[in-house]
Image (tube, rainbow, N blue to C red):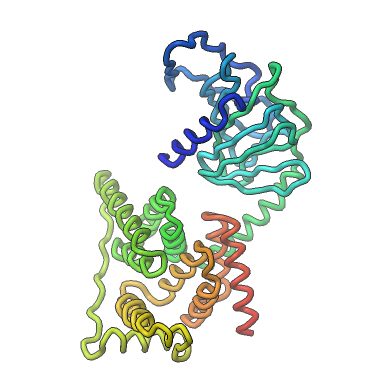
Amino acid sequence: MNRIKKIFAVVLLSLTLLISATPFIGQSLAADSSESSMTITRSNSQTSSKGSSKFFTGNVRVDTLFSENESQPYSGAYVTFSPGARTAWHTHPTGQRLVITKGVGYVQVWGGPIEEVREGDVVWFPPGVKHWHGATPTKAMTHMALTGVLDGKNAEWMEKVTDEQYGTMKEISKKQKQETEIQALSAKQQSIVKIAAFTANGDLEELKDSLNESLDSGMTVNEVKEVLVQMYAYAGFPRSLNGINTLMEVLGEREAKGIKDVIGKEASPLPANKTSIELGTEIQTSLVGAPVSGGVYSFAPVIDQFLKGHLFGDIFGRDILDYQSRELATISALANMDGVTSQLEAHFNIGFNTGLTEAQMRGLISVLESEVGAKLAKNAEESLQKVLSNRQ
């Protein structure tokens, strides 16, 4: 929520004298006549109303924030769309700014593709551009709307967005396909995918929800902790430490509610008769399917020692998670990072070598698409297709 507040502050500063919002309410509140002192509008005094069926399809709620006045011709409102709800086509004389505060939604300008938007995204529609916005067929969405007033008018409303334009049946069919693919993963595996993805991209609010879900689904505290520890080898110490701190916060909140989570087993001691590098070399060779060598390891031998001794020896050698779980976590993390396509493809291959199936890989991608973002899922899908072609 702090992130949203910061975005809100930046947007307001940049939009003064340009934007005003709530084209969704037939009339504005009376302007504050006082120009010489601060004004505070308390939350319990703000109005809430149902979006008019003239301008919306589906169930929509409009929560007024503030109205325009002579010196600042813009107003604001939170607009909440239930799944399937959306605006009609419309334009604004001075443009419109949307700040997505919760959920997943769609936005589209006339003649352009439907774009998915999520919490924290900011959308700008230029003056006079025909567009619509709303929730997806399966997820609700709330945005803050800021729209300008010109000559007493803030919107030009047009025809409704048809089901065909909205893509309702296509989206539902896509969602059903996703849900079918996701079922190839166990509840624990789905949790690992989300924990790794949100740790790697630093989305701690979503990570917090995923940590609660993972514990509710039966993962032990040590299993969850192990995913977060492994992430430092791929996403770095800062992201890993943030994830561990978030887990500590979640556990504290759950304990305060009387929830007793299972701690789970500790890692077994590593073999006493092998060094970490020896153990790691064995594990790496087994997972990759052949001894690993290359120019980068000759150029920087120490990185080869760290990779074999620390990553595959000290981390992968810990038996709290099996190799399949670790590869699901690794692939999910790499899919959330730019510029690591070759490593992502390598770990898809390693995942297959651990016994993960194509159906499980597609389930992983569907979890990413459903929970994290379509762009990430598309990149992972392209890497998977390349790996499948090469393996065949």
Res 176 → quadrant? bottom right
Res 77 → quadrant? top right
Farthest residue, direction top: 33
Q: Quadrant of the C terminus?
A: bottom right
Left or right side of 361 for 25: right
Q: Position of residue 11 (x, y in %)?
A: 53, 34
Count of labels shown? 0
Q: Is residue 152 above or below residue 98?
A: above
Q: Residue drawn 56% across and 64% down?
A: 365
Left or right side of 77 for 150: right
Q: Residue drawn 62% across and 33% down?
A: 59
Q: Position of residue 129 (x, y in %)?
A: 74, 36
| Residue nearest the viewer, comparing 95 with 90 | 95
Left or right side of 159 for 359: left
Q: Quadrant of the N terminus?
A: top left
Q: Position of residue 272 (x, y in %)?
A: 21, 87
Q: Is residue 107 above or below residue 174?
A: above
Q: Residue drawn 49% across and 77% down?
A: 351
| Residue nearest the viewer, comparing 95 with 285 | 95
